[in-house]
Amino acid sequence: MRGAKQLGILAAVTISTSALLGGVAAAADEIPEDAAVASSEVDVISSRETTMPDTKGTGVPAIKCKTYQTTRTAKNAFGSTQFKFHQKVTWCYNGKKITSASSKAWADSLASGWNYKGVQSTETSGGAGKASYTAWRQGKFCLVVPGTGERCISEKRPWIEQKVTKTGGASSSGGM
């Protein structure tokens, strides 16, 4: 995948529930390594396809456009959502090439204590005039104990890669 960028995921330093509520944190060796985010999942949402006006019957292949969205959802050990990281690609194609392509990323559904620090890395390739377009982004989320300032006690860097094609195909992958 992205080698060094995926190594940007830092080792999680976690704290006990009592520390989040103002108590003293337990020693690091007493706390499960990934207690803050126990699991993550990928949701893929593909929206409707549209055909551009005035492209049928002109001797030119009809131009169609699609939007493809992928979401990484981080959950704690109890199954509660901690945060979501999204990426959406919008592209138009005619079966011979991609005619336009763009992408964007954002976060939402932040649980108490989690802060979104923005997109940390972006790579794109292909696009207009090419057979495919690939967009890759990595976000950064930081868990902060209330009342301790902005000191990050656990950090997650989810990433999403999406590839779309000149025929309307789409695929994605992601990690935490």
Image (spheres, helix red, strand yellow):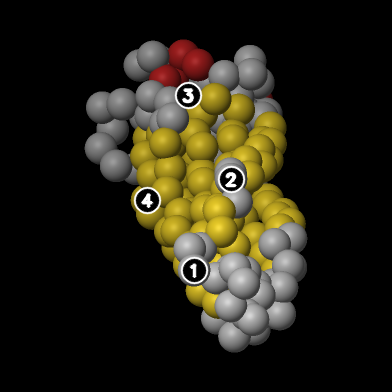
Q: Residue at x 48, y 24 (%)?
A: 25
Q: Residue 83 at x, y = what percent?
A: 49, 34
Numbered circle sitting on residue 70: none
Does the image show residue 168? yes
Between the residue at mark 4 and the residue at mark 2, the CA separation in whole angstroms equals 31 Å
5 left or right, relative to 142? right
Task: Read off the residue under disc 3.
Answer: 25
Q: Residue at x 56, y 30 (%)?
A: 36
| Element type at mark 1 | loop
Give the mark toward the camera: 4 or 1.
Answer: 1
Give the mark toward the camera: 1 or 3.
Answer: 1
Looking at the image, residue 61 lies above or below residue 114: below
Instruction: Check whether the beta carbons of the residues at disc 1 and disc 2 lie within 8 A of each other.
Output: no
Looking at the image, residue 91 lies above or below residue 21: below
The residue lying toward the viewer, choosing from 163 and 119, is 163
Between the residue at mark 1 and the residue at mark 3, the CA separation in whole angstroms equals 65 Å
Query: Is tag 3's residue or tag 4's residue first in the polypeptide sequence?
Result: 3
The residue lying toward the viewer, choosing from 123 and 9, is 123
Numbered circle sitting on residue 54: 1
59 left or right, relative to 112? right
* Tag 4: amino acid: Lys
* Tag 1: amino acid: Asp
- Residue 110 falls in which quadrant of the image? top left
Q: Residue 145 at x, y = what percent?
A: 37, 29
* Tag 3: amino acid: Ala
Task: Read off the residue under disc 2.
Answer: 48
Task: Read off the residue under disc 4.
Answer: 117
| Element type at mark 2 | loop
Query: Is tag 3's residue or tag 2's residue first in the polypeptide sequence?
Result: 3
Query: Is tag 1's residue or tag 3's residue first in the polypeptide sequence?
Result: 3
